[in-house]
Image (cartoon, rainbow, N blue to C red):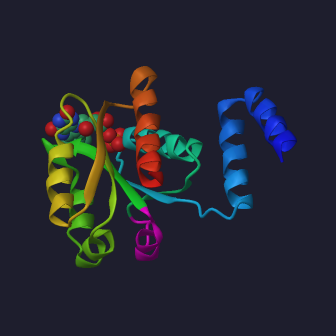
Amino acid sequence: MQTSLIIVSILIEKTTANQKSLICICMRCISGEILLKILVIYDSLTGNTAKAAELIAEGAKESGAEVTLRKIGEVSLEDMKNADAVILGCPTHAFSASKTMKDFLSLPAVGESLRDKAGAIFTSCRITPMALRWLEKTLIRMNFKVLGKLGVHAAPKGREAEACKKLGKIVAENLKS
Ligand SMILES: Cc1cc2nc3c(=O)[nH]c(=O)nc-3n(C[C@H](O)[C@H](O)[C@H](O)COP(=O)(O)O)c2cc1C
């Protein structure tokens, strides 16, 4: 048992971050530990919020979560009900959330599926990430626990791209503890 632990440690030392997360996922599957299911739901008109959503999903995957990425219009109630955590994002439009996101969250069935869940929120904006305020206010009314929030400018690059990955990690790590 000790020898196999040493071998695993050596292997982990010599692997890249992505390989490490894969090893973690495999080890958790072998040990029978259930994978955390994280759902990332987004709206995006010109692709910037979509880019943020992809990076957030990547960060959550690196923490060993099973991640589903869905654009509004493609997400099902089943996806929401099955998720341990939900991360929602949209572009900032007219100092608030996009209409598509507002319409989506105003659907009673969606509200019910998200009730009492936990997760995070994000937005892409040109100047000020005002959508966060609307998202947080709306989700808190559903007794949704907001574990993190992030505003990025246009398509996230550099530090903002890293912050996106970190948001995914924060949600995954928070659920584990
Ligand atoms: C109709 C419209 C309204 C917008 N209003 C705002 C705003 O109030 N504040 C802001 O910072 N950016 C605003 N923007 C800029 C977008 O938030 C920004 O371009 C964002 O990166 C777009 O994300 P997307 O590519 O996912 O659609 C607006 C864009 C559009 C098209």
Say which quarter of the image contains residue 139.
bottom left
Q: With 24 as the anchor, is 81 left or right in this view?
A: left
| Residue 78 among those drawn in magenta | yes
Q: Which residues are magenta?
A: 73-84
Q: In the displayed structure, would residue 67 be above or below residue 133?
A: below
Q: Nearer the viewer, residue 46 or 168?
A: 168
Q: In the displayed structure, would residue 20 be above or below residue 40?
A: above
Give me the residue at 15% from left, 46% from top: 133
Q: In the displayed structure, would residue 2 be above or below residue 177?
A: above
How far from the left and from the top, in percent, is residue 154? 34, 31
How far from the left and from the top, in percent, is residue 87? 37, 53
Give me the residue at 55% from left, 53% from top: 65
Q: With 160 as the anchor, is 63 left or right in this view?
A: right
How far from the left and from the top, in percent, is residue 130? 16, 40
How far from the left and from the top, in percent, is residue 90? 30, 48
Give me the residue at 39% from left, 38% from top: 48
Q: Nearer the viewer, residue 94 or 35?
A: 35
